[in-house]
């Protein structure tokens, strides 16, 4: 490599304290196929140690302008932009957007979805995908920073070690497409089987038991935790609720702060899930105790989430539950088998016009 040229380009300082490792880094990048232009661009934004990983992860070299992408994919330019925006991939000015051959192939596949589902439905689906994949990417990135040696530059041995770690993670990212494909298609099959058990009179309607469980006093407790302890607590809540809901035969919809929402195909399963979640949290050495609530009825299922009065009711009822207990409408008491329950009477529930008779039972016997 021409050291004078590298110095002129701002990539190398012959008098710098890290000149030896910087030269080793540049030689490593060149040996792995990183172009000089890519090094200059990465250095300009402080990412030279990570350019190896960036180049490996990037799905192809993005050199195709919007018009060219449109011609190759058969998708109108305006629709290309709407698709990219729905996926959350528009960060730059439209004039500077560039696409790779992989991007073109993805757009060709998505054009089939648009022809099948319609543009509005497909774009809404892509918003869900984009949000979900963005969260997955963020989780994977931060996991690597915390757990992969040398991936966090401030703790790395040097720039070369950080570059090698980034390259290794880039290779893992390429392989992750295999995992994503397998897991997504398995979940698609599971979703179709789940629908067989819960379908309603319309494709987006289902008869479900909807439950919420939250940690008692977590807001107060979290103020006393440092960042590491808080991370441990959140991770434990995530892991424990996921396992308990799955073992009970339910489906975890989402985490909302210190609360988890789940659904089940019937009331009996919903009750079992609620008991398992509360019991598992009580057995944890990290988490405070929990409480839960359950409701049952017709629910709107859309974009992987659930909506409607039944969902709102279950969410509101949690506040009336004692620690380690579950609250349900009194109309469901016939489904409680031999459980001993406490009559709470008619409760005034925010958002509902009439008071509702409810009962409560201990989740841990």
Image (tube, rainbow, N blue to C red):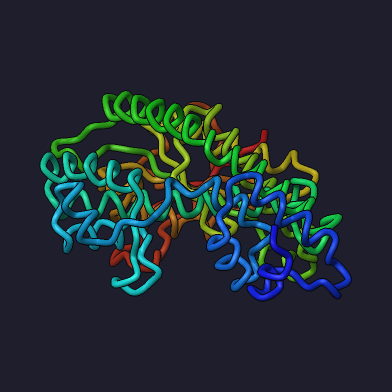
Which residue is pictured at 71% across the width and 73% down the height? 7
Q: Residue at x 28, y 46 (%)?
A: 104
The relative height of residue 140 versus residue 245 in the rendered view (above or below) is below
Whether residue 359 appears in this view of the structure is: yes
Please state if 335 lies on the left or on the right of 284 as rendered.
left
In the picture provided, is 245 more to the left or to the right than 205? right
Compared with 186, 283 (above or below) is below
State the image quarter where residue 315 is shown: bottom left
Q: Is residue 206 above or below residue 217?
A: above
The percent coordinates of residue 287 (x first, y second) are 73, 50
Exactly how many numbered labels are in the figure? 0
Q: Nearer the viewer, residue 318 or 265?
A: 265
Q: Nearer the viewer, residue 292 or 47?
A: 47
Instruction: Tell me residue 194's x, y (percent).
Output: 33, 28
Q: Is residue 80 left or right of residue 161?
A: left
How far across and how far down the image is residue 365, in percent?
A: 67, 33
Instruction: Tell me if 88 is positioned left or right of 49 in this view.
Output: left
Residue depicted at 72% across the width and 47% down the height: 165
Return the residue nearer the eye: 342 or 89: 89
The residue furthest right is 17
Residue 288 in sight: no
Q: Position of residue 288 (x, y in %)?
A: 73, 53
Quadrant the N terminus occupies: bottom right
Q: In the image shown, does 59 or 172 lie closer to the viewer?
A: 59
Asked if residue 148 is positioned above or below residue 244 in the image, the reply reads below
């Amino acid at each position: 490599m021409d050291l004078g040229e590298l110095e002129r380009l701002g990539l190398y300082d012959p008098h710098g304290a890290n000149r030896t490792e910087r030269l080793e880094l540049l030689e490593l990048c060149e040996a792995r196929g990183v172009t000089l232009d890519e090094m200059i661009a990465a250095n300009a934004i402080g990412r030279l140690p990570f350019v190896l990983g960036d180049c490996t992860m990037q799905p192809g070299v993005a050199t195709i302008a919007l018009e060219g992408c449109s011609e190759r994919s058969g998708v109108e330019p305006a629709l290309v932009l709407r698709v990219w925006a729905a996926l959350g991939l528009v960060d730059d000015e439209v004039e500077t957007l560039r696409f790779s051959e992989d991007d073109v192939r993805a757009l060709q596949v998505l054009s089939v979805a648009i022809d099948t589902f319609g543009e509005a439905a497909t774009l809404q689906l892509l918003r869900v995908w984009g949000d979900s994949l963005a969260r997955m990417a963020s989780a994977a990135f931060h996991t690597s920073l915390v757990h992969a040696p040398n991936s966090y530059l401030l703790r790395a041995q040097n720039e070369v070690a950080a570059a090698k770690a980034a390259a290794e993670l880039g290779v893992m990212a390429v392989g992750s497409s295999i995992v994503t494909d397998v897991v997504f298609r398995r979940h698609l099959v599971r979703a179709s089987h789940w629908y067989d058990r819960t379908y309603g009179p319309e494709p987006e309607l289902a008869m479900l038991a909807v439950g919420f469980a939250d940690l008692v006093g977590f807001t107060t407790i979290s103020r006393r935790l440092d960042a590491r302890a808080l991370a441990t607590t959140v991770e434990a809540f995530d892991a424990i609720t996921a396992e308990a809901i799955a073992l009970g035969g339910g489906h975890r919809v989402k985490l909302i702060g210190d609360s988890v929402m789940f659904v089940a195909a019937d009331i009996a399963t919903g009750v079992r899930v609620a008991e398992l979640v509360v019991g598992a949290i009580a057995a944890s050495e990290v988490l405070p105790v929990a409480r839960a609530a359950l409701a049952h009825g017709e629910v709107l299922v859309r974009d992987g989430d659930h909506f409607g009065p039944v969902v709102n009711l279950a969410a509101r009822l949690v506040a009336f539950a004692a620690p380690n207990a579950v609250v349900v409408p009194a109309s469901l008491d016939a489904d409680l088998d031999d459980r001993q329950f406490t009559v709470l009477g008619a409760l005034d529930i925010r958002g509902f016009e009439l008071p509702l008779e409810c009962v409560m039972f201990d989740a841990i016997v």
